[in-house]
Amino acid sequence: MIRFLSFPLFFAKKKKQPLLKNKRQCSDKKVRKFMLSEVEIKTALRCDLSIRSIFINDKLMHLSSFVARLLTKNIDFDLTLSKIKARNLSLITKITCLFISFGFIQFVSAQSYAPPAGQVGSTAIHKDSSVFINWATGCTVTRGYKDISDTTLGYADFGADTNAIGFATGSSVVSLGDRGEAVIIFERPITNGPGPDFAVFENSFSETFLELAFVEVSSDGINFFRFPAVSETQTDTQIGGFGSVDARYLYNLAGKYIANYGTPFDLDDVAGTFGLNENAITHVKIIDVVGSINPQYGSFDSQGNYVNDPFTTPFASSGFDLDAVGVINELVLGLGENFESKIRVYPNPTQNSVNVNTLESGTYSLESINGKQIEQGDFLGNFQLNLSQEKKGIYLLRMITKKGSSVKRIVKK
Protein backbone atom coordinates (compact mmCIF):
# COMPACT_ATOMS: atom_id res chain seq x y z
CA MET A 1 0.00 0.00 0.00
CA ILE A 2 1.13 3.59 -0.56
CA ARG A 3 0.56 6.49 1.80
CA PHE A 4 1.26 10.18 1.25
CA LEU A 5 3.31 11.94 3.90
CA SER A 6 2.92 15.49 5.15
CA PHE A 7 5.63 17.30 3.18
CA PRO A 8 4.80 20.51 1.22
CA LEU A 9 5.62 20.48 -2.49
CA PHE A 10 8.25 23.19 -2.75
CA PHE A 11 8.00 23.23 -6.54
CA ALA A 12 4.27 23.97 -6.71
CA LYS A 13 3.49 26.72 -9.22
CA LYS A 14 0.70 28.30 -7.25
CA LYS A 15 0.45 29.50 -3.68
CA LYS A 16 0.33 26.51 -1.40
CA GLN A 17 -2.92 25.70 0.30
CA PRO A 18 -2.75 24.81 3.98
CA LEU A 19 -2.43 21.12 4.72
CA LEU A 20 -5.90 19.92 5.67
CA LYS A 21 -6.98 16.62 7.12
CA ASN A 22 -10.63 16.55 6.12
CA LYS A 23 -13.57 18.63 4.99
CA ARG A 24 -14.52 19.68 8.49
CA GLN A 25 -11.20 21.49 8.86
CA CYS A 26 -11.70 23.55 5.68
CA SER A 27 -12.77 27.13 6.33
CA ASP A 28 -12.09 28.37 2.80
CA LYS A 29 -15.13 27.59 0.65
CA LYS A 30 -13.08 27.40 -2.53
CA VAL A 31 -10.75 24.86 -0.99
CA ARG A 32 -13.66 22.95 0.50
CA LYS A 33 -15.31 22.80 -2.90
CA PHE A 34 -12.45 20.76 -4.32
CA MET A 35 -11.73 18.57 -1.29
CA LEU A 36 -12.50 14.92 -1.95
CA SER A 37 -13.56 12.37 0.60
CA GLU A 38 -12.19 8.82 0.50
CA VAL A 39 -15.54 7.63 -0.86
CA GLU A 40 -15.41 10.22 -3.65
CA ILE A 41 -11.87 9.20 -4.55
CA LYS A 42 -12.81 5.53 -4.68
CA THR A 43 -15.83 6.35 -6.84
CA ALA A 44 -13.68 8.32 -9.26
CA LEU A 45 -11.13 5.55 -9.50
CA ARG A 46 -13.80 2.99 -10.39
CA CYS A 47 -14.18 4.64 -13.80
CA ASP A 48 -12.90 2.58 -16.70
CA LEU A 49 -9.84 4.75 -17.26
CA SER A 50 -6.33 3.39 -17.58
CA ILE A 51 -4.63 6.58 -16.42
CA ARG A 52 -5.38 8.69 -13.36
CA SER A 53 -3.87 11.95 -12.20
CA ILE A 54 -4.02 13.67 -8.86
CA PHE A 55 -3.68 17.37 -8.03
CA ILE A 56 -1.86 17.77 -4.73
CA ASN A 57 -1.44 21.33 -3.45
CA ASP A 58 -2.34 22.45 -7.00
CA LYS A 59 0.48 20.46 -8.61
CA LEU A 60 -0.70 17.91 -11.18
CA MET A 61 0.67 14.47 -10.45
CA HIS A 62 0.18 11.60 -12.88
CA LEU A 63 0.04 8.07 -11.55
CA SER A 64 -0.74 4.78 -13.20
CA SER A 65 -4.13 3.24 -12.38
CA PHE A 66 -2.27 0.57 -10.42
CA VAL A 67 -0.69 3.10 -8.09
CA ALA A 68 -3.92 5.06 -7.87
CA ARG A 69 -5.86 1.98 -6.80
CA LEU A 70 -3.24 1.34 -4.12
CA LEU A 71 -3.80 4.84 -2.79
CA THR A 72 -7.44 4.09 -2.09
CA LYS A 73 -6.48 1.26 0.26
CA ASN A 74 -5.39 3.62 3.02
CA ILE A 75 -5.47 7.30 2.13
CA ASP A 76 -3.73 9.78 4.40
CA PHE A 77 -5.57 13.10 4.23
CA ASP A 78 -2.59 15.12 5.47
CA LEU A 79 -2.46 16.60 1.98
CA THR A 80 -5.17 18.46 0.08
CA LEU A 81 -6.50 16.26 -2.75
CA SER A 82 -8.01 18.78 -5.13
CA LYS A 83 -9.06 16.98 -8.30
CA ILE A 84 -8.98 13.64 -10.06
CA LYS A 85 -9.34 13.31 -13.82
CA ALA A 86 -7.91 11.46 -16.82
CA ARG A 87 -4.63 12.57 -18.40
CA ASN A 88 -1.97 11.05 -20.64
CA LEU A 89 0.80 8.67 -19.62
CA SER A 90 3.76 10.95 -20.32
CA LEU A 91 4.81 11.73 -16.73
CA ILE A 92 3.76 8.57 -14.91
CA THR A 93 7.19 7.10 -14.33
CA LYS A 94 8.96 10.42 -13.72
CA ILE A 95 6.44 11.78 -11.25
CA THR A 96 6.06 8.51 -9.34
CA CYS A 97 9.84 8.25 -8.99
CA LEU A 98 9.97 11.92 -7.99
CA PHE A 99 7.45 11.31 -5.22
CA ILE A 100 9.40 8.34 -3.93
CA SER A 101 12.80 10.08 -4.14
CA PHE A 102 11.60 13.16 -2.24
CA GLY A 103 9.84 11.07 0.39
CA PHE A 104 6.27 12.02 -0.54
CA ILE A 105 5.24 8.38 -0.86
CA GLN A 106 5.78 5.86 1.91
CA PHE A 107 5.31 2.14 1.44
CA VAL A 108 3.70 0.69 4.53
CA SER A 109 2.74 -2.81 5.48
CA ALA A 110 -0.88 -3.92 5.40
CA GLN A 111 -2.71 -7.07 4.51
CA SER A 112 0.49 -8.68 5.74
CA TYR A 113 -0.50 -12.33 5.94
CA ALA A 114 -1.67 -15.27 3.87
CA PRO A 115 -4.86 -14.82 1.78
CA PRO A 116 -8.00 -17.03 1.80
CA ALA A 117 -7.94 -20.68 0.74
CA GLY A 118 -7.39 -21.24 -2.96
CA GLN A 119 -5.50 -18.00 -3.53
CA VAL A 120 -1.81 -17.75 -4.33
CA GLY A 121 0.18 -17.67 -1.11
CA SER A 122 -2.55 -19.15 1.08
CA THR A 123 -1.42 -21.47 3.87
CA ALA A 124 -4.80 -23.21 4.12
CA ILE A 125 -4.61 -27.02 4.16
CA HIS A 126 -7.53 -29.07 2.84
CA LYS A 127 -8.91 -31.73 5.16
CA ASP A 128 -8.12 -34.48 2.65
CA SER A 129 -4.45 -33.52 2.36
CA SER A 130 -1.96 -36.35 2.75
CA VAL A 131 0.06 -34.25 5.21
CA PHE A 132 -2.30 -35.27 8.02
CA ILE A 133 -1.09 -38.42 9.73
CA ASN A 134 -3.43 -38.39 12.73
CA TRP A 135 -6.37 -36.59 14.33
CA ALA A 136 -7.58 -35.69 17.82
CA THR A 137 -8.67 -38.60 20.00
CA GLY A 138 -10.31 -36.66 22.83
CA CYS A 139 -11.98 -33.30 23.48
CA THR A 140 -13.31 -31.56 26.58
CA VAL A 141 -15.27 -28.33 26.07
CA THR A 142 -16.00 -25.62 28.60
CA ARG A 143 -18.83 -23.59 27.09
CA GLY A 144 -18.95 -19.82 26.92
CA TYR A 145 -22.00 -17.56 26.79
CA LYS A 146 -24.11 -17.10 23.68
CA ASP A 147 -23.57 -13.39 24.20
CA ILE A 148 -21.08 -12.30 26.83
CA SER A 149 -22.70 -8.86 26.87
CA ASP A 150 -26.07 -10.41 27.77
CA THR A 151 -25.46 -13.44 29.99
CA THR A 152 -29.19 -13.96 30.53
CA LEU A 153 -29.24 -15.77 27.17
CA GLY A 154 -27.25 -18.62 28.72
CA TYR A 155 -24.49 -20.72 27.25
CA ALA A 156 -23.80 -21.95 23.72
CA ASP A 157 -24.96 -25.54 23.40
CA PHE A 158 -24.64 -26.60 19.78
CA GLY A 159 -22.85 -29.88 19.10
CA ALA A 160 -21.15 -32.41 21.35
CA ASP A 161 -17.55 -32.59 22.53
CA THR A 162 -17.04 -35.75 20.50
CA ASN A 163 -17.77 -33.84 17.27
CA ALA A 164 -14.21 -32.50 17.42
CA ILE A 165 -12.68 -35.99 17.51
CA GLY A 166 -11.39 -37.60 14.35
CA PHE A 167 -11.40 -36.35 10.77
CA ALA A 168 -12.61 -32.89 9.76
CA THR A 169 -16.06 -32.99 8.16
CA GLY A 170 -16.92 -29.34 7.61
CA SER A 171 -20.28 -29.82 9.30
CA SER A 172 -20.07 -31.84 12.52
CA VAL A 173 -18.82 -29.27 15.04
CA VAL A 174 -19.01 -28.18 18.66
CA SER A 175 -19.64 -24.48 19.37
CA LEU A 176 -17.57 -22.93 22.13
CA GLY A 177 -19.54 -19.75 22.83
CA ASP A 178 -17.99 -16.42 23.85
CA ARG A 179 -14.61 -17.14 25.44
CA GLY A 180 -15.42 -20.85 25.64
CA GLU A 181 -12.58 -23.29 25.25
CA ALA A 182 -11.80 -26.84 24.16
CA VAL A 183 -8.89 -29.01 25.29
CA ILE A 184 -7.79 -31.54 22.69
CA ILE A 185 -5.68 -34.67 23.20
CA PHE A 186 -4.01 -37.06 20.77
CA GLU A 187 -2.90 -40.66 20.54
CA ARG A 188 0.72 -39.58 20.32
CA PRO A 189 2.36 -36.22 21.13
CA ILE A 190 2.75 -33.61 18.41
CA THR A 191 6.36 -32.70 17.71
CA ASN A 192 8.11 -29.70 16.21
CA GLY A 193 9.00 -30.91 12.73
CA PRO A 194 9.58 -29.16 9.40
CA GLY A 195 6.85 -26.66 8.50
CA PRO A 196 3.49 -26.53 10.29
CA ASP A 197 2.89 -29.23 12.89
CA PHE A 198 -0.91 -29.28 13.18
CA ALA A 199 -3.97 -27.50 11.83
CA VAL A 200 -7.27 -26.38 13.35
CA PHE A 201 -10.54 -26.58 11.41
CA GLU A 202 -13.62 -24.37 11.77
CA ASN A 203 -16.83 -24.49 9.71
CA SER A 204 -17.09 -20.98 8.26
CA PHE A 205 -19.56 -20.81 5.38
CA SER A 206 -17.61 -18.09 3.53
CA GLU A 207 -14.12 -16.67 3.12
CA THR A 208 -15.04 -13.54 5.05
CA PHE A 209 -17.36 -14.70 7.86
CA LEU A 210 -14.57 -15.70 10.20
CA GLU A 211 -15.09 -16.63 13.85
CA LEU A 212 -11.66 -16.75 15.43
CA ALA A 213 -9.91 -18.48 18.31
CA PHE A 214 -6.58 -18.37 20.10
CA VAL A 215 -4.51 -21.57 20.18
CA GLU A 216 -2.39 -22.77 23.08
CA VAL A 217 -0.29 -25.89 23.55
CA SER A 218 0.95 -27.90 26.54
CA SER A 219 3.39 -30.73 27.08
CA ASP A 220 2.05 -31.61 30.54
CA GLY A 221 -1.68 -30.88 30.37
CA ILE A 222 -1.39 -28.18 33.04
CA ASN A 223 0.72 -25.33 31.72
CA PHE A 224 -0.48 -23.92 28.40
CA PHE A 225 1.35 -21.47 26.16
CA ARG A 226 -0.31 -19.33 23.48
CA PHE A 227 0.80 -18.90 19.89
CA PRO A 228 1.59 -15.22 19.20
CA ALA A 229 -1.58 -14.19 17.39
CA VAL A 230 -1.85 -10.98 15.36
CA SER A 231 -4.93 -9.14 14.10
CA GLU A 232 -4.46 -6.11 11.84
CA THR A 233 -8.21 -5.71 11.31
CA GLN A 234 -9.38 -2.15 11.91
CA THR A 235 -10.70 -1.43 15.39
CA ASP A 236 -12.53 1.84 14.73
CA THR A 237 -15.85 0.17 13.91
CA GLN A 238 -17.32 -2.98 15.44
CA ILE A 239 -17.79 -5.82 12.94
CA GLY A 240 -21.43 -6.89 13.21
CA GLY A 241 -22.78 -10.36 13.84
CA PHE A 242 -22.65 -11.25 10.15
CA GLY A 243 -19.88 -8.84 9.15
CA SER A 244 -16.76 -9.56 7.13
CA VAL A 245 -13.15 -10.18 8.14
CA ASP A 246 -10.19 -10.23 5.73
CA ALA A 247 -7.96 -13.27 6.26
CA ARG A 248 -4.96 -11.26 5.05
CA TYR A 249 -4.99 -9.30 8.30
CA LEU A 250 -4.81 -12.40 10.52
CA TYR A 251 -1.94 -14.55 11.77
CA ASN A 252 -1.91 -17.49 14.20
CA LEU A 253 -5.65 -17.29 14.77
CA ALA A 254 -7.72 -20.43 14.25
CA GLY A 255 -10.77 -19.88 12.05
CA LYS A 256 -8.83 -17.91 9.43
CA TYR A 257 -10.10 -20.17 6.65
CA ILE A 258 -13.39 -21.41 5.25
CA ALA A 259 -14.82 -24.83 6.19
CA ASN A 260 -12.80 -27.88 5.10
CA TYR A 261 -9.55 -25.89 5.21
CA GLY A 262 -7.35 -25.96 8.30
CA THR A 263 -5.36 -23.08 9.75
CA PRO A 264 -1.79 -24.36 10.27
CA PHE A 265 0.32 -23.80 13.39
CA ASP A 266 4.09 -24.16 13.58
CA LEU A 267 5.63 -25.02 16.96
CA ASP A 268 8.67 -22.98 15.99
CA ASP A 269 6.57 -19.99 17.09
CA VAL A 270 6.64 -21.18 20.71
CA ALA A 271 9.95 -23.06 20.69
CA GLY A 272 12.21 -22.32 23.63
CA THR A 273 9.35 -21.31 25.92
CA PHE A 274 10.19 -22.13 29.52
CA GLY A 275 7.99 -24.96 30.78
CA LEU A 276 7.10 -26.25 27.32
CA ASN A 277 8.58 -29.20 25.46
CA GLU A 278 7.71 -28.31 21.88
CA ASN A 279 8.79 -31.76 20.78
CA ALA A 280 6.17 -33.53 22.89
CA ILE A 281 2.89 -31.59 22.78
CA THR A 282 0.17 -33.63 24.48
CA HIS A 283 -2.65 -31.05 24.63
CA VAL A 284 -3.96 -28.28 22.37
CA LYS A 285 -6.35 -25.69 23.76
CA ILE A 286 -8.71 -23.68 21.54
CA ILE A 287 -10.05 -20.47 23.13
CA ASP A 288 -12.83 -18.48 21.47
CA VAL A 289 -11.99 -14.87 20.66
CA VAL A 290 -14.61 -12.39 21.85
CA GLY A 291 -14.52 -10.14 18.81
CA SER A 292 -15.79 -7.06 20.61
CA ILE A 293 -13.89 -3.77 20.59
CA ASN A 294 -15.63 -2.87 23.84
CA PRO A 295 -12.95 -2.86 26.59
CA GLN A 296 -15.38 -4.67 28.88
CA TYR A 297 -15.50 -7.78 26.69
CA GLY A 298 -12.83 -7.62 23.99
CA SER A 299 -9.92 -9.99 23.37
CA PHE A 300 -6.41 -8.81 22.58
CA ASP A 301 -3.76 -10.20 20.26
CA SER A 302 -0.07 -10.58 21.13
CA GLN A 303 0.55 -6.93 20.24
CA GLY A 304 -2.20 -5.52 22.43
CA ASN A 305 -4.67 -4.93 19.60
CA TYR A 306 -8.35 -5.75 19.85
CA VAL A 307 -9.28 -8.76 17.72
CA ASN A 308 -12.32 -7.48 15.84
CA ASP A 309 -14.54 -10.26 14.48
CA PRO A 310 -18.33 -10.82 14.17
CA PHE A 311 -20.01 -9.74 17.40
CA THR A 312 -22.56 -10.42 18.72
CA THR A 313 -23.67 -13.91 17.61
CA PRO A 314 -26.31 -14.72 20.27
CA PHE A 315 -27.21 -18.21 19.11
CA ALA A 316 -26.82 -21.80 20.26
CA SER A 317 -23.87 -21.99 17.86
CA SER A 318 -22.22 -18.85 19.22
CA GLY A 319 -18.48 -18.44 19.06
CA PHE A 320 -15.83 -20.60 17.46
CA ASP A 321 -17.22 -23.79 15.90
CA LEU A 322 -14.54 -26.45 16.31
CA ASP A 323 -14.55 -29.12 13.63
CA ALA A 324 -11.24 -30.95 14.11
CA VAL A 325 -7.52 -30.74 14.81
CA GLY A 326 -5.27 -32.57 12.37
CA VAL A 327 -1.73 -33.70 13.24
CA ILE A 328 1.05 -33.17 10.71
CA ASN A 329 4.18 -33.95 12.76
CA GLU A 330 3.93 -36.66 15.38
CA LEU A 331 6.52 -37.79 17.89
CA VAL A 332 8.34 -40.83 16.51
CA LEU A 333 9.69 -43.43 18.91
CA GLY A 334 13.45 -43.43 19.04
CA LEU A 335 13.68 -47.23 18.91
CA GLY A 336 10.64 -47.92 16.77
CA GLU A 337 8.18 -50.37 18.32
CA ASN A 338 10.92 -51.92 20.52
CA PHE A 339 10.45 -49.26 23.21
CA GLU A 340 6.66 -49.57 23.38
CA SER A 341 6.72 -53.35 23.20
CA LYS A 342 8.84 -53.44 26.37
CA ILE A 343 6.18 -51.61 28.39
CA ARG A 344 3.69 -53.90 30.13
CA VAL A 345 0.45 -52.68 31.71
CA TYR A 346 -1.55 -55.24 33.73
CA PRO A 347 -4.14 -56.27 34.70
CA ASN A 348 -6.00 -54.62 31.86
CA PRO A 349 -9.03 -54.39 32.09
CA THR A 350 -8.90 -53.65 35.82
CA GLN A 351 -11.27 -52.87 38.67
CA ASN A 352 -8.78 -51.19 40.99
CA SER A 353 -5.14 -50.63 40.05
CA VAL A 354 -2.72 -51.41 37.24
CA ASN A 355 0.97 -52.17 37.29
CA VAL A 356 3.28 -50.57 34.75
CA ASN A 357 6.48 -52.46 34.06
CA THR A 358 9.29 -50.62 32.25
CA LEU A 359 13.07 -50.27 32.42
CA GLU A 360 12.95 -46.61 31.38
CA SER A 361 12.51 -43.34 33.28
CA GLY A 362 10.50 -40.29 32.33
CA THR A 363 7.15 -38.61 32.90
CA TYR A 364 3.62 -39.96 32.73
CA SER A 365 0.06 -38.67 32.78
CA LEU A 366 -3.22 -40.54 33.20
CA GLU A 367 -6.19 -38.98 31.38
CA SER A 368 -9.82 -39.72 30.69
CA ILE A 369 -10.81 -40.39 27.09
CA ASN A 370 -12.06 -36.77 26.95
CA GLY A 371 -8.67 -35.37 27.90
CA LYS A 372 -9.23 -34.62 31.59
CA GLN A 373 -6.02 -35.16 33.47
CA ILE A 374 -6.37 -37.44 36.50
CA GLU A 375 -2.78 -37.93 37.59
CA GLN A 376 0.72 -37.06 36.45
CA GLY A 377 4.24 -37.58 37.70
CA ASP A 378 7.72 -38.92 37.11
CA PHE A 379 8.70 -42.57 37.02
CA LEU A 380 11.93 -44.49 37.35
CA GLY A 381 11.28 -48.04 36.29
CA ASN A 382 8.12 -49.85 37.43
CA PHE A 383 5.17 -47.99 39.01
CA GLN A 384 1.50 -48.48 39.87
CA LEU A 385 -1.70 -46.53 39.13
CA ASN A 386 -4.75 -46.60 41.38
CA LEU A 387 -8.07 -46.35 39.49
CA SER A 388 -10.31 -47.57 42.29
CA GLN A 389 -12.01 -44.17 42.65
CA GLU A 390 -12.45 -43.58 38.92
CA LYS A 391 -15.58 -44.24 36.89
CA LYS A 392 -15.87 -47.12 34.48
CA GLY A 393 -14.52 -46.35 31.05
CA ILE A 394 -11.39 -45.97 28.94
CA TYR A 395 -8.31 -44.12 30.19
CA LEU A 396 -5.10 -43.13 28.44
CA LEU A 397 -1.68 -43.57 30.01
CA ARG A 398 0.92 -41.35 28.32
CA MET A 399 4.61 -41.98 28.94
CA ILE A 400 7.46 -39.85 27.62
CA THR A 401 11.12 -40.83 27.89
CA LYS A 402 14.36 -39.95 26.15
CA LYS A 403 13.86 -42.95 23.92
CA GLY A 404 10.38 -42.03 22.78
CA SER A 405 6.77 -41.98 23.88
CA SER A 406 3.98 -44.42 24.42
CA VAL A 407 0.20 -44.23 24.83
CA LYS A 408 -1.53 -47.16 26.51
CA ARG A 409 -5.28 -47.63 26.78
CA ILE A 410 -6.54 -48.83 30.14
CA VAL A 411 -10.07 -50.15 30.63
CA LYS A 412 -11.69 -49.66 34.04
CA LYS A 413 -14.49 -52.11 34.73
Image: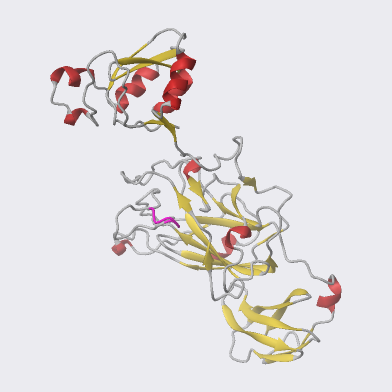
- Report if residue 374 is visible in the image: yes
Q: Is 382 part of what is drawn in magenta?
A: no
Q: Is residue 371 above or below residue 295?
A: below
Report which quarter residue 258 is drawn in.
Answer: top right
37 or 19, which is in the foreground? 19
- Quadrant for the C terminus, please: bottom right
> On the picture, is 46 further left or further right than 58?
right
Q: Is 302 part of what is drawn in magenta?
A: yes
Query: Where does the image place residue 392, in percent across and percent down from the top left?
Result: 62, 83
Instruction: Look at 45% across and 59% down and name the residue there.
Output: 288
Our reading of the magenta stretch's main secondary structure is: loop
> On the picture, is 281 further left or further right than 295?
right
364 or 98, which is in the foreground? 98
> On the picture, is 91 further left or further right than 37?
right
Instruction: Look at 27% across and 24% down and name the residue there.
Output: 80
Instruction: Look at 60% across and 41% down and name the residue there.
Output: 122
Q: Is residue 233 above or below residue 60?
A: below
Instruction: Tell me how the rendering is colored.
Output: secondary structure
For the record, the magenta segment spans 301-305
- Quadrant for the N terminus, please: top left
- Report if residue 48 is visible in the image: no
Query: Where does the image place residue 354, in percent across and percent down from the top left?
Result: 72, 89
